[in-house]
Image (tube, rainbow, N blue to C red):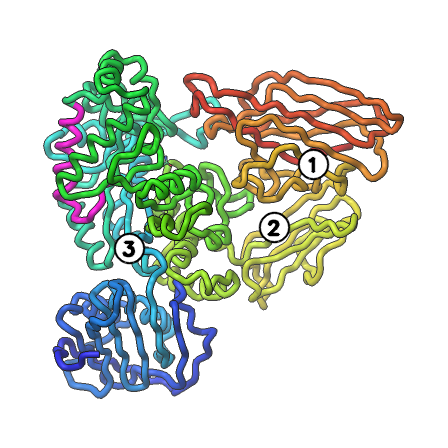
């Protein structure tokens, strides 16, 4: 450590007094958890004048800390010299830029790092050791030593400002919240079908036309028929505002990656300049969600437009990467476009996927010539990956595995673990979201290194990112609700050692962290005190187990619809159909979370043996096959819970076998029919019943296609002693033209099979 070149840079005197006290290890609640921390005896008490001393190269960080203290603790600085110091030092022996050492002694606090990045993270840890500004009667910091560094270099959060537009102040708040979690990359999704949000001076119609839509879809895309609010909506960031945000992010050690989508998700730009599309027809800025056929036509004039846009973008964003999108670009217009077809032949391309690859590779070359690298969504693998591209894997992790094996860097954002636009609780009253189910715990247990990579290939995994698509987030408050606390769990996935992974320890620290979020007026989702339930089948004896994420407060329950008043200790015996209610109450019997409710229908299938000839898709198999006969129906609005099972493009045969033959009158179930998400109810269901007398009865029902989100199905049979039955569920097949996901196989989602 070099002490020689200290500049006496800032002099801060802090006037606080408090009693000396010891602090327990459990009270050190830093998120993300540091790599190494050791508590020492004693505390650093801010009751005397404290000097802030910094190497000039770290003055930006010590300034940041000074301002933080001033703003949050109303400290009156005094230039008098004190006896305690907070010392920021450059230590060249520290190997990594984001690494830091923080040592708190009774008389001094030492922060050492290679550069400002590490120092900034040391300050973030230190801030979390300070009392809450509302709790100032104990301004003491435990003596300890921390040595810390991240697991991954790319620790990102994304925000879609195309579907809904958010203020510059909010963007700064979002960046600030990320930075506190030691996240270092903000992926700013700036262009969409529903709005172009970045000022491009050379193309004024992007501001006049592409930035505004005439109205917006009301409710969920799956609600039919579509209804609109009739209100114009839009906005864009001026280049001055973007510079301001970029400069702000720099003070938080956050790099911004701008995303300019191509060739798809470009309808807004094509609305402004119809000649950018294949047909040249005038289209409007999209007013609903989804994937649109309007994509850029790869004409020379289109490339000129995109290169001009990139020129202005490059001048605004100093980071290494430009994200060029590449996802969800339907090939319909290219198939029907004479120019595109000629180009495919001229370039010797295989097909339209080859054309997409040509498009991206050509733009990559241009962007590389500006000294920047491209990132694209995993569709850029189709038809061949551009030579230097980094792949952002969102459709699972397959894209990441393939790209890493081809020697490309990858960033993991799989829908299963990183889509923070999905629901986060099973509570039916959650605010409207796109669908899916991604609870906090699942994010916490994410491993960004996908299976199937060698150690060498795994080095291409730069990290991961939480994606916040805003179709269903109209307000900044709603963005906060969806992003937090899941971004907090992700920060720990990306920064902390997997060796320290411990969800209950994380939750304990999160309870403290949430108090800081309260102070910052963040509308995070608080599901720590929500009750969860699970039916347990122990050798045919059924019981319902309740739990909460935090064990700080007890659960109360009822089984008769009354307000929960019985203290829960052991699983509730389920020997009849029942309606369980449960809630977490504090010592004053005030509910800390919403009342949980679960109906259990003890039908004849519950406790039987079930087999399915195909595995459900791993992302939609939370409850396993027994979820179909556990007496519990899935959520009415969401297929991603632990009751629905999802199958991708396959017919399935469900076999249910009884210990003793059962007289069965009806078999009913239901299918999810969310066509916007490529999920279709089947058109055909077959049955085979294996009777006690050795006979087999077969039947097939053809179902009419419906547009309801939930399709109920019920089959009646003459009450017969059935030993075993097969239900054959045919997949819908290929999604027709003109529908979301056209050309792909539909998904099948099936709920509880109720046997009566
Ligand atoms: C995406 O979610 N379309 C990348
Ligand atoms: Zn074309």
Residue matched to label 1:
611
Relative horizontal placement of residue 426, taking residue 237 as reference (left or right): right
Respond yes or no on whether mark 1 lies under 8 Å from ligand 1: no
Q: Main secondary structure of the magenta part?
A: helix
Residue closer to the observer: 161 or 365: 365
Question: Residue shown at 67%/37% (left/top)?
Answer: 628
- Label 2 vs label 3, nearer the camera: 3
Q: Where residue 703 sits in the image (x, y, percent)? A: 63, 18
Which residue is drawn at the image coordinates 79% and 20% (left, top)? Answer: 697
The C terminus appears in which quarter of the rendering? top right
Residue at which label 2 appears = 596
Contact check, label 2 and label 3, Cβ < 8 Å: no
Span of residues in magenta = 302-322
Q: Is residue 233 visible to us here? A: no
Q: Residues within 10 Å of mark 2 (few under 14, many from 20)?
A: many
Q: Earlier in the sequence, mark 1 or mark 3?
A: 3
Is there any visible trace of residue 208 in the rendered image? yes
Q: Earlier in the sequence, mark 2 or mark 1?
A: 2
Q: Residue at x 23, y 32 (%)?
A: 361
Residue 19, position as x, y percentages in the image: 38, 87
CA–CA distance in space, label 1 to label 3: 46 Å
> Considering the numbered disc 1 on the image, is that residue within a helix, a strand or a loop?
strand
């Amino acid at each position: 450590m070099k002490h020689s070149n200290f500049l006496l840079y800032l002099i801060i005197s802090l006037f606080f007094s408090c009693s000396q006290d010891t602090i327990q290890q459990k009270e050190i609640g830093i998120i993300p958890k540091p790599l190494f921390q050791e508590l020492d005896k004693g505390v650093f008490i801010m009751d005397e004048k404290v000097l802030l001393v910094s190497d000039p190269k770290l003055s930006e960080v010590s300034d940041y800390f000074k301002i933080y203290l001033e703003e949050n603790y109303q400290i009156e600085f005094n230039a008098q010299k004190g006896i305690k110091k907070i010392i920021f030092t450059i230590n060249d022996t520290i190997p990594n830029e984001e690494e830091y050492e923080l040592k708190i002694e009774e008389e001094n606090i030492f922060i050492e790092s290679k550069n400002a990045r590490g120092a900034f993270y040391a300050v973030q840890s230190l801030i979390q050791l300070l009392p809450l500004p509302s709790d100032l009667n104990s301004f003491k910091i435990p003596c300890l030593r921390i040595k810390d560094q991240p697991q991954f270099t790319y620790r990102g959060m994304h925000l879609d400002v195309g579907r809904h537009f958010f203020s510059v102040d909010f963007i700064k708040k979002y960046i600030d919240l990320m930075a506190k979690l030691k996240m270092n990359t903000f992926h700013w999704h700036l262009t969409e079908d529903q709005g172009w949000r970045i000022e491009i001076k050379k193309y004024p119609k992007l501001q006049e036309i592409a930035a505004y839509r005439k109205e917006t879809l009301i409710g969920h895309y799956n609600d039919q028929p579509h209804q609109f609010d009739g209100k114009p909506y839009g906005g864009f960031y001026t280049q001055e505002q973007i510079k301001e945000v970029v400069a702000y992010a720099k003070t938080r050690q956050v790099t911004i990656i701008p995303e300019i989508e191509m060739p798809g998700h470009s309808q807004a730009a094509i609305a402004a300049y119809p000649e950018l599309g294949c047909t040249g027809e005038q289209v409007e800025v999209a007013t609903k969600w989804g994937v649109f056929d309007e994509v850029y036509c790869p004409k020379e004039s289109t490339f000129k437009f995109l290169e001009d846009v990139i020129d202005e973008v490059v001048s605004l964003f100093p980071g290494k990467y430009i994200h060029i999108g590449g996802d969800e670009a339907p090939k319909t217009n290219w198939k029907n476009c004479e120019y595109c077809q000629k180009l495919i032949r001229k370039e010797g391309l295989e097909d339209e996927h080859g054309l997409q690859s040509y498009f991206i590779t050509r733009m990559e070359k241009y962007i590389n010539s500006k000294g920047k690298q491209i990132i694209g969504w995993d569709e850029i693998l189709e038809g061949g990956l551009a030579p230097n591209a980094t792949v952002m894997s969102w459709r699972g992790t397959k894209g990441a595995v393939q790209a890493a094996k081809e020697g490309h860097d990858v960033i993991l954002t799989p829908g299963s673990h990183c889509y923070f636009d999905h629901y986060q609780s099973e509570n039916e009253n959650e605010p409207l979201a796109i669908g899916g189910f991604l609870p906090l715990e699942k994010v916490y247990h994410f491993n960004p290194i996908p299976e199937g990579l060698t150690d060498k290939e795994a080095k291409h995994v730069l990290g991961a990112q939480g994606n916040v698509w805003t179709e269903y987030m109209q307000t900044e408050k709603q963005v906060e609700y969806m992003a937090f606390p899941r971004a907090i769990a992700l920060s720990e996935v990306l920064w902390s050692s997997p060796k320290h992974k411990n969800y209950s320890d994380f939750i304990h620290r999160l309870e403290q962290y949430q108090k800081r979020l309260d102070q910052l007026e963040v509308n995070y989702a608080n599901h720590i005190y929500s009750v969860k339930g699970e039916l347990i089948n122990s050798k045919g004896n059924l019981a319902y187990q309740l739990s909460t994420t935090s064990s700080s407060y007890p659960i109360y329950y009822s089984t008769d619809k009354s307000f929960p008043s019985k203290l829960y200790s052991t699983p509730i015996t389920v020997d009849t159909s029942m309606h369980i209610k449960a809630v977490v109450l504090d010592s004053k019997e005030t509910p800390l979370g919403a009342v949980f409710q679960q109906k259990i229908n003890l039908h004849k299938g519950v406790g039987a043996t079930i087999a399915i000839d195909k595995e459900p898709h791993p992302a939609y198999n939370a409850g396993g096959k027994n979820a179909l006969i556990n007496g519990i129906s899935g959520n009415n609005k969401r297929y991603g819970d632990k009751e629905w099972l999802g199958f991708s493009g396959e017919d399935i045969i469900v076999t249910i076998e009884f210990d003793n033959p059962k007289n069965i009158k009806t078999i009913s179930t239901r299918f999810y029919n969310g066509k916007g998400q490529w999920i279709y109810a089947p058109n055909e269901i077959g049955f085979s019943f294996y009777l006690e007398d050795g006979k087999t009865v077969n039947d097939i029902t053809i179902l009419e296609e419906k547009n309801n989100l939930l399709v109920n199905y019920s089959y009646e049979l003459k009450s017969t002693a059935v030993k075993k039955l097969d239900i054959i569920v045919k997949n819908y097949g290929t999604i027709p033209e003109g529908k979301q996901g056209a050309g792909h196989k539909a998904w099948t989602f099936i709920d509880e099979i109720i046997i009566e």
